[in-house]
Image (cartoon, grey):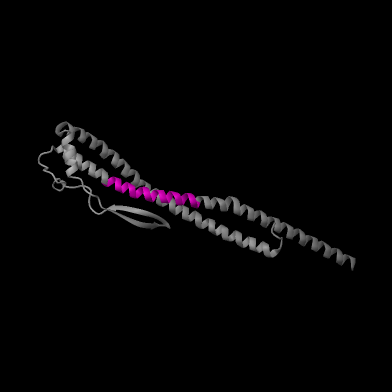
Amino acid sequence: MIHPTRTNLLKLKEKKQSIDAAVLILKARRQALVREFIQSTRPFLQTRSVIKDIYSKALVELQLSLGHEGHDFIEALAAVSRRQIGLRIEQCNLLGVKYKEVSTSESMIRSPEERNYDYRNPTPHLEETFDLFEKIVEEIIKLAAFESKLKRLADRIIRVTRKTRILEERILPCLNKQTKTISQYLCERELEAHFRLKKFKEMHT
C-alpha cells in the first residue's frame, strides 16, 4: 500500500496521465497497423486467386501435352530448359515493423527462344504449359513477399493489442483504485482536522 500523502497522490495522478497518453498512442498505432494489414490482405488474396486459376489451366494444358508428346519427352525438355532463379531479398520497415521484401532479378516468364530447345517441334499445348507454370512461379514469389509482410504485421498487432489491454485492464484500474483510496483518506483526514479545529474554537470562546 502506498503511503497516503498528497505527494504520492500527485505522483499517482501523473502516472495515470502518462499511461492514458500511452494507451491513446498504442490504439492509434494499432489502428494504423490494422489499416495496413487490410490493405496488404487484398493483393494477397488476389494473388492466391490468380495462382488457383492459372494452376487449374496449367494442369489441363499439361494433360493435353502428355497425350501428344509423352511423359519422357516433356521431362527431357524440362531438364534442358531448367535455370537458376535470382532472388532479391530486401529488409523493409513499415510503422516500425521489419519484414523482408522478395523480388526477382528477371522475369519468370520466358519466350520460347529462351528455353534452350527447338520450340518448333512441341505442340502449342506444351508451350502454354510452360508459360502457365512460369506465371505460377512469378505469382508464388509475389505471394511469399505478402506472406512475410502480413505475418509480421499480424504479430505486431497482437503485441500492441496485448500491451493495450494490460494497461487498460490491469494497470489503470489499480492506479484508479489507489488514487481513490488515498483521496478518500486525505478527505477524511481534512474533515477530522476541520472538526477538531471547530471544537477547539468552541472551547475557547
Q: Residue furthest left?
A: 120
Magenta stretch holds residue 43: no
Quadrant assignment for the C terminus? bottom right
Given residues 144 and 51, the one toward you in this image is 144
Residue occupying the point 29% across, 39% down: 52
Tally of numbered discs = 0
- Residue at 80% across, 60% down: 192
In the rendered view, would you say 121 is above or below 178? above
Q: Which residues are magenta?
A: 138-160
Residue 34, percent across and down?
A: 44, 50
Q: Is residue 140 magenta?
A: yes
Question: Which quarter of the picture shows residue 55?
Answer: top left
Q: Is residue 190 left or right of residue 94?
A: right
Outermost residue to the bottom: 204
Q: Is residue 7 left or right of residue 64?
A: right
200 or 132, nearer to the observer? 132
Q: Is residue 99 above or below residue 63?
A: below
- Let me know if residue 205 appears in the view: no
Say whether residue 133 is visible: yes
Q: Residue 4: x and y, percent? A: 71, 60
* Residue plotted at (33% across, 56% down): 90
Residue depicted at 39% across the width and 58% down the height = 93
The x and y percentages for residue 61 are 20, 35
- List x then y, in percent, for residue 1: 70, 56
Residue 192 sits above or below residue 113 on the image: below
Specify whether 20 is left or right of 74.
right
Horizontal side of 180 relative to 51 (left or right) equals: right
Q: Is the magenta region chiefly helix, strand or loop?
A: helix
